Image (spheres, rainbow, N blue to C red):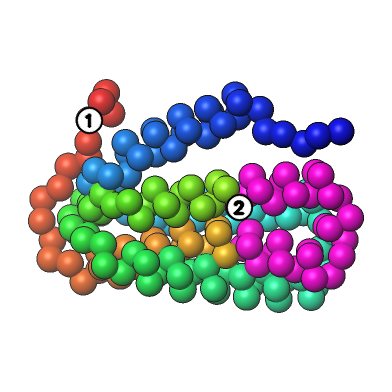
Amino acid sequence: MTQHIDLGIILLIGLIAWIIYKRTVKDNTMELKKLVILPILFLYLTYSMLTKHFVLVPTDFVTIIIGMIIGAIIGFMVSSNVNVRADHEQNLICVAGSWVNLIIVLIIVAVKFGVGYIISTNPSLSHSGVGKHVLFVLVAAATSLMIGRYLAYYLKYVNATSEHLELPDKKR
């Protein structure tokens, strides 16, 4: 039996990439609480993915934490040069649009899709020692890119001079 990816899936991924591109290359003003909510959501989704596909033992969490640290450091370093404006009175942050945002989101989606595909086509890999831990590091690092990125944004927000910002109109 031949393994192939359906053309519809490729088109769907392309459409998602285009939508993300349109949202990430322009400046994005958002409430500061989103810098906390989104990483927590990604952590929850990652945890549910890992517990769905793997039987986790305590030593697995060490590997997952190492992957998270690696991803957070990379996400922080990549996002540390992004321009951030702050409105401390309204708790708003404006992050300059960048290709980095698109690349990070695509990495997260690609890793999660890829790991799911690998596990579905080779279920024994989720039980082997080295293969299982490599997948843990990949998934944890990809998820933590967002955490490091938002940590860099928050530190820039704290140190930025406050200026008046407005949330974009939701109708656009």
Quarter holding the C terminus is: top left
Task: Give the label on residue 169, or none.
Answer: 1
Q: Is residue 11 left or right of residue 75?
A: right
Question: How far apart, in angstroms, are the residues tagged by discs 2 and 1?
Answer: 33 Å
Establish if 143 lies above or below 22: below
Q: Residue at position x 52%, y 27% from top?
A: 11
Q: Which residues are magenta?
A: 111-140
Q: Is residue 141 visible?
A: yes
Residue 116 location (% of width, % of height) = 72, 46
Taking depth in this image into account, of 146 and 21 the one nearest to the observer is 21
Q: Which residue is mark 2?
A: 111
The secondary structure making up most of the magenta span is helix
Residue 111 location (% of width, % of height) = 60, 52
Instruction: Return the disc, 2 or 1, that comes first in the chain's sequence.
Output: 2
Q: Residue at position x 17%, y 42% from top?
A: 166
Q: Residue at position x 70%, y 73% from top?
A: 63
Establish if 151 lies above or below 118: below
Magenta stretch: includes residue 66: no
Establish if 148 lies above or below 89: below
Q: Is residue 59 left or right of residue 151?
A: right
Q: Is residue 141 left or right of residue 49?
A: left
